[in-house]
Amino acid sequence: MDFSIAAILAQDGVSTGAVYALLALAIVLVFSVTRVIFIPQGEFVAYGALTMAALQTGKFAATATLLLALGIVAFLMELVDAVQQYRLIGHGRGLLKTLLQATGKYLLFPLLVYAIAKTVPGIHLPLLLQAALTLLIVVPMGALLYRVAYQPLAEASVLVLLIVSVGVHFALVGLGLVMFGAEGSRTTPFSNASFQWGTLTVSGQSVIIILMSLLLIGALYTFFERTLAGKALRATAVNRLGARLMGIETGRAGRLAFTLAVGMGALSGILIAPITTVYYDSGFLIGLKGFVGAIVGGLSSYPVAAAGALLVGLLESYSSFWASAFKEVIVFTLVIPILLWRSLTSTHSEDEE
């Protein structure tokens, strides 16, 4: 391997590592707020990429139908909870207010997005508007998914929440096959520019991926480490009852965390779709590599998780050159020494009952 090949592999590793970093940060974000190991994170990478591809080919984005279905289920669950609360306290004004809010959030908004998605096919939209519409369709699924699948079990153990995540993952993969089919898709790159750096040619799309990742990493780190609101969100994972007593609405915190995580996943899909073919089940493997980065950070540290994801990207890139058939094995084997090291250096304590 000469220097030019090493430089090309490093560029590929940094570009893919930047995407893995976004996913690692999203996984850390969800876990730090809700204690949920968000296995379906990768599915929203595929949803973002394939929704964007559908818009570019003039097809109806079937994810809008899924958004509307999730909204209807969430509204029915909210209705049942409101009726039960009314029977307990007998206060009709609170019931009416809850129903009006639920109608707006869970029915009218998804219906509006569905109507927009229905009218778009056949209309040529600029690339940035296609990306914005993709995010508008996919991102709200985060809050709806939390309301439907996780909020009723918010007080459950981490193991129960993990089992729920596995079930949600399989459901989303199956729905992805129904919505998008088995064929893969690519999208138009945001930039066709290229930059010469010595013997290395850097594509404009790679630069965009890296810059967007750095921007989001900095924003998340600042929010959760330097602001009172970010620390309040993290407090819900440490002690949900204590957070409620301090005036933190844990349900809203969970919905916000899932919305941000799904948004980062969808954005990752939009960014990588021009440089790799994405299939309905491609997100799972991508999400697992982001999870490896999150494990490096102990599911708690944003900068270390981002650095771990970058390491995963570089390791994958160089492994594909030296041992292409075993690159996935090499990447996932990285988890073993990290877990052993953390097991030996962490202070163990019994879980609270």
Image (cartoon, rainbow, N blue to C red):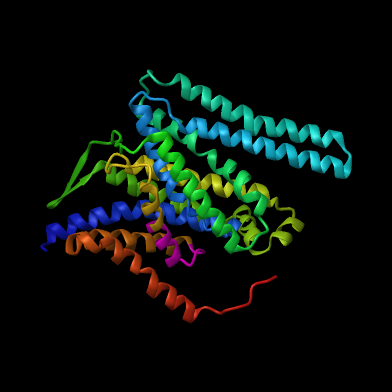
Q: Is residue 222 visible?
A: no
Nearer-the-camera pick, 269 or 152: 152
Residue that appears at 46% across and 55% down: 25
Where residue 254 sits: x, y (%)? 61, 50
Residue that appears at 54% across and 38% down: 140
Residue that appears at 48% across and 37% down: 138
Nearer-the-camera pick, 154 or 207: 154
Q: Is 295 contained in the magenta span?
A: yes
Quadrant for residue 33, please give it: bottom right
The vertical placement of 279 against 352, above or below, is above
Where residue 54 sits: x, y (%)? 37, 30
Q: Is 129 contained in the magenta span?
A: no
Residue 226 shown left or right of residue 309 in the figure: right
Residue 216 shown left or right of residue 165 in the figure: left
Task: Pick out the residue farthest to the right.
Answer: 90
Q: Which residues are magenta?
A: 289-301
Nearer-the-camera pick, 124 or 145: 145
Where residue 93 sits: x, y (%)? 84, 33
Q: Is residue 139 visible?
A: yes
Residue that appears at 41% across and 28% down: 129
Residue 271 shown left or right of residue 89 in the figure: left
Question: Magenta span: helix, strand or loop, mainly?
Answer: helix
Where residue 227 sits: x, y (%)? 59, 55
Quadrant for residue 105, please give it: top right
Q: The N terminus appears in which quarter of the rendering? A: bottom left
The vertical placement of 264 against 39, above or below, is above
The vertical placement of 156 against 86, above or below, is below
Nearer-the-camera pick, 159 or 44: 159
Q: The C terminus appears in which quarter of the rendering? A: bottom right
Total count of labels: 0
